[in-house]
Amino acid sequence: MKTLRKNKFLRRALALLLVCMISFTACTSEEQKEPGQIEENRSGIKIGMSFDSFIIERWRRDCDVFVSKIKEYDSNADVMVQNANGDIETQKSQIRYLIEKKVDVLVIVCIDSESLNDVCYEAKTAGIPIIAYDRLIKNSNVDLYISFDNEMVGTLMGNALVEEGLPNRKVLMLSGPNEDNNVSMVESGFRNVMQQHGVMITDCVHAAGWKAEISAEYVNQHLTDLSDVDAIMCGNDNIATTIIRTLAEARMAGKIKIVGQDADLEACQRIVEGTQVMTVYKPVEKLAQAAAEYAIQLAEKKPLTDVTNTIFDGTYDVPYFYLEPIAVTKDNIDETIIDSGFHLKEDVYLNVRED
């Protein structure tokens, strides 16, 4: 009986000794890891993206390309995308949420260029750099504003209409919201061309929240006033789509020349069909990829490369990187839109019969 108890005691002692040896080995192994090895096992960079909304067709494309580029660089990266659905208070709340999540960088497509300086200040106080994507955020001293040459967008629109001919020298402008700083820049370029060629702008209407139905309502109420208007400058292709449908319902389709921007698929289809003069193609893939690269540089506290321009935000001169837009007409749509892979040829020419 005593021998049995002694054997049990020895077995328990050996088991205890084995557990201690395993624990000691594990602790020693963790302590001997190089600091770099421990860092590599942690999650990657964290980026917060706040979008105005996804009403405009191109924003989803921008988002997808941006996220893909970030993941290509860091497979462990966490890109937190927020959609404010056009509501400024929602956007502020979502940005504050991203600040609380301690993101490494904020990328913002603002709804109102004048209303985010308070949350931008909160982000910068928290040490979070900010990229104003495609739309300038005023009085906020962002770390980078990345966009296209928006005044050139308006210039291209104006030139396209002049080249098509404006016999009555009358044009209507149906722009986006005043809160979008790009709108004033596009209008400036367009107005300059109209002034140079002695063309009268009969009216300028701003669609709040980029809601195309506001522009359509205006056209419906002023159909008689459009009898001698040569053309309509639409703030984007979504507005152009709605206006062309409205004119078609009034049996005025094809009588008024239309231009827009963003190279939406429907706009490209109308260009080859002959019902829209031109659209402005902004290679958003290049913009989104560049923004992703700059976001990574800011997240890693590196200086921004190839950013040599600045733009005045109302208070500060902020770093400014821009790409050139491209006018798209039926003469160059294949090389600009199709060859670049922006839209497929079969989609663009869907409604055009081959001879």
Image (tube, rainbow, N blue to C red):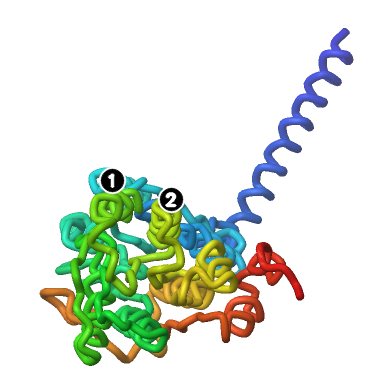
Question: What amino acid is found at the position of numbered circle 1 in the picture?
Answer: Asp
Location of residue 9 (image quadrant): top right
Residue at the spot x=54%, y=67% of the render? 270
Q: Nearer the viewer, residue 123 or 142?
A: 142
Instruction: Report whether 283 appears left or right of 138.
Output: right
Give the structural element (helix, strand or loop) at label 2. Answer: helix
The Cα–Cα distance between marks 1 and 2, rounded to whole angstroms, is: 31 Å
The residue wearing badge 2 is: 249
Q: Residues within 10 Å of mark 2 (few under 14, many from 20)?
A: few
Kind of residue at disc 2: Glu
Farthest-out residue, left: 315
Q: Quadrant of the C terminus?
A: bottom right
Precedes in sequence: disc 1 or disc 2: 1
Which mark identifies residue 87?
Answer: 1
Q: Secondary structure at mark 1?
A: loop
Given residues 20 and 256, the one toward you in this image is: 256
Q: Is residue 145 above or below residue 82?
A: below
Report crowding for label 1: few under 14, some 14 to 19, many 20 or more residues within 10 A (C-alpha): some
Residue extending furthest toward the top = 1
Quick check: can you spot residue 12?
yes
Residue 273 disc label: none
Residue 238 seen in render: no
Q: Position of residue 268 (x, y in %)?
A: 55, 69
